[in-house]
Image (cartoon, helix red, strand yellow):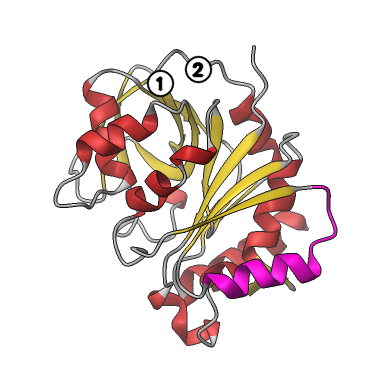
Amino acid sequence: MQRVKQCLILAAGNGSRLRAISANLPKPLVEFQGRPILEHIVHRTQESWIEEFVIVLGYRGDLIRDWFEKHWRGRARFTWVYNPDFHKSNGISALKARNALHDNFLLLMADHLFEPETARMMVRQHLAPGEVILGIDPKIDRIFDIDDATKVRRWGDRIVDIGKDIKVYDGIDTGMFLCTPALFDDLDRASKDGNCSLSDGMRQLARGRRLRALEIDAPWHDLDTPEAFAHANTESLRYAA
């Protein structure tokens, strides 16, 4: 099995819903328990033996790059990609990075925290040609903001529908994907008027039975709002205790 060497992190959004606590910093630099969110994510991903990170920047991206150039002391290697269309959906940010990724890669969001073992489990999976594996949480009752969550519906181990507004679902998208570079072709096909979300691309994969679910049985948090941020802090402290 080919070892996964690269991680793509989407960090371009303007984080408008977190402005009440961000002081206009880009969301990846907002501190969670004393360190920027993105620093947590990189450190935790490194525990799955990944050292190459492709990070897509947008809103105030210069601040993110400057912070890492001044403060990062680890072994990680960074490739910085700028997305001037950061106001569009997150599939566009992923497409901006396609020239930097040629083998299978882990795809993460810059505001989703996870346990290191989750990343280790993801990168140990075998990918068929053109396939994507999505980490899903089947414990719907523990989701903090179910209305805002991206839902999935499965048939066996295959995801057959995905989206925030689907009515029938049996899991939640955790924002962690193991991908082949074929993902970029699916995002291209899903684009309409120069825009697409990751979920648009995932629906393309689902129609071809190339989107597989992997159940995640560990804490994870989407730090998208001040309320979710406070909830994650409380849950993390409780979990650590």
When the figure is inspected, residue 83 is found, relative to residue 163, above or below; the finding is below
The residue drawn where x is 41% and y is 49% is 96
| Span colored in magenta | 61-75
Q: Classify residue 28 by image quadrant.
A: bottom right
Please, which residue is most extreme toward the front here?
Answer: 99
**Front-most of 37 and 89?**
89
In the rendered view, tell whether residue 68 sits above or below residue 16: above
- Residues at circles 2 and 1 in contact by the CB criterion of under 8 Å: yes
Which residue is rendered at x = 21% and y = 34% of the image?
Answer: 189
Could you tell me residue 133's position as x and y percent?
A: 45, 27
Please name the amino acid that badge 2 sits on. Leu
Q: Is residue 73 magenta?
A: yes
Category of crowding for the residue at label 2, using alpha-carbon neighbours closer than 10 angstroms: few (below 14), some (14–19), many (at least 20): some
Residue of label 2:
127
- Callout 1: helix, strand or loop? loop
Depth order, front residue of 55/134: 55
Whether residue 113 is in magenta: the answer is no
Q: Which mark is residue 131?
A: 1
**Residue 59: horizontal and vertical position, in percent?**
45, 72
Left or right of 154? Residue 9 is: right
Residue occupying the point 61% across, 69% down: 64
Q: Which of 106 and 144 is in front in this view?
A: 106
**Residue type marked 1:** Glu
Residue at left offset 39%, top offset 26%: 182
Q: Is mark 2 on a helix, strand or loop?
A: loop
How many marks do you count on the picture?
Answer: 2
